[in-house]
Image: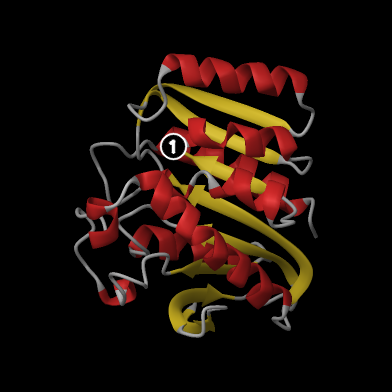
Amino acid sequence: MSGSDVKVKSSEGSEFDCYLATPESGTGPGVIVVAAVTGVGPDMREMTDDLAAHGFVAAAPDMFWRTDPGYIERTDETQPRIQARTQPREEIINTGIQDVADMRDFLKGHGSCNGKVAAIGFCYGGPYALIGTARLGLDAGCSYHGTNMGAYKADLEKSSQPILIHWGDQDHAAPPELVAEYQDYAAKMDNLSVHIFPGVKHGYMMTTAPAAYDADAYRHSWDATLSLLGGLK
């Protein structure tokens, strides 16, 4: 199964690129796939396709369309977007909130979506698992090796929908004190699960980053994700 490149209407008036994959089963929950700063490359497309194969309407948008559009054609997976090299990361994440809201509306209006929508995010995209459930009415969120997660703890506290957080214990973006805070939250919140993988680095979900990719942690994370999202069917 493979998806296709489509255009999504922004509430700002322009259009942006998105990789969309739909399930052969007909209808299913929508999933917004927020890529790392390297964009929607082969790894993100494979995961989007796999979500569709499991019965989800999966869409990976271009979150950097304002400053560095056309990432779907980009083949260099080693460099972040221009915007990510010139703006503070939290500022970029906040700018993208409206894009996630537009993707929510796009998926809810898609004929294959059952009305439920979740967000999964990698690295830069990780905080949208919290933002989406707390501010945008999304039904679930999953974060993998998320960055800037400390800046969005207030969103975590406001979230009542299921959330999964995944980090490796060798992740430079997840210092031990931050991981401990999230584990404390998980002990108090029935809707939150935090998974920490020993010896695993930042970027472990990225098959295009061989120095970081970890097959066992990937599979554990992906199985947990499919299980969580399955509750939206």
Task: Name the residue located 52 percent from the left edge and 33 percent from the top edge.
Answer: 166
Task: Name the residue located 65 percent from the left edge and 16 percent from the top edge.
Answer: 184
- Which quadrant would the C terminus be assigned to in this image? bottom right
Q: Which residue is mark 1?
A: 148
Q: Is residue 10 left or right of residue 38?
A: right
At which x and y percent is residue 29?
73, 65
At which x and y percent is residue 103?
59, 70
Give residue 176's quadrant in the image.
top left
Q: How is the image coloured?
A: secondary structure
Task: Name the residue located 20 percent from the left edge and 53 percent from the top edge.
Answer: 78
Give residue 63's quadrant in the image.
bottom left
Identify which residue, 43 or 53, lies in the foreground.
43
Q: Is the residue 106 above or below the residue 137 in the image?
A: below
Identify which residue, 202 or 67, lies in the foreground.
67
Q: Is residue 209 left or right of residue 111?
A: left
Q: Secondary structure at mark 1?
A: loop
Give residue 109's quadrant in the image.
bottom right
At which x and y percent is residue 15?
46, 84
Circle 1 residues within 10 Å: few <14, some 14–19, many ≥20: some
Q: Is residue 91 visible?
A: yes
Identify which residue, 168 or 64, lies in the foreground.
64
Amino acid type of disc 1? Asn
Identify which residue, 89 or 144, lies in the foreground.
89
Q: Is residue 213 left or right of residue 154?
A: left
Count of all numbered marks drawn on residues in the image: 1
At which x and y percent is residue 130?
62, 43
Task: Name the residue located 33 percent from the left edge and 54 percent from the top edge.
Answer: 37
Q: Is residue 47 visible?
A: no
Q: Is residue 74 left or right of residue 117?
A: left
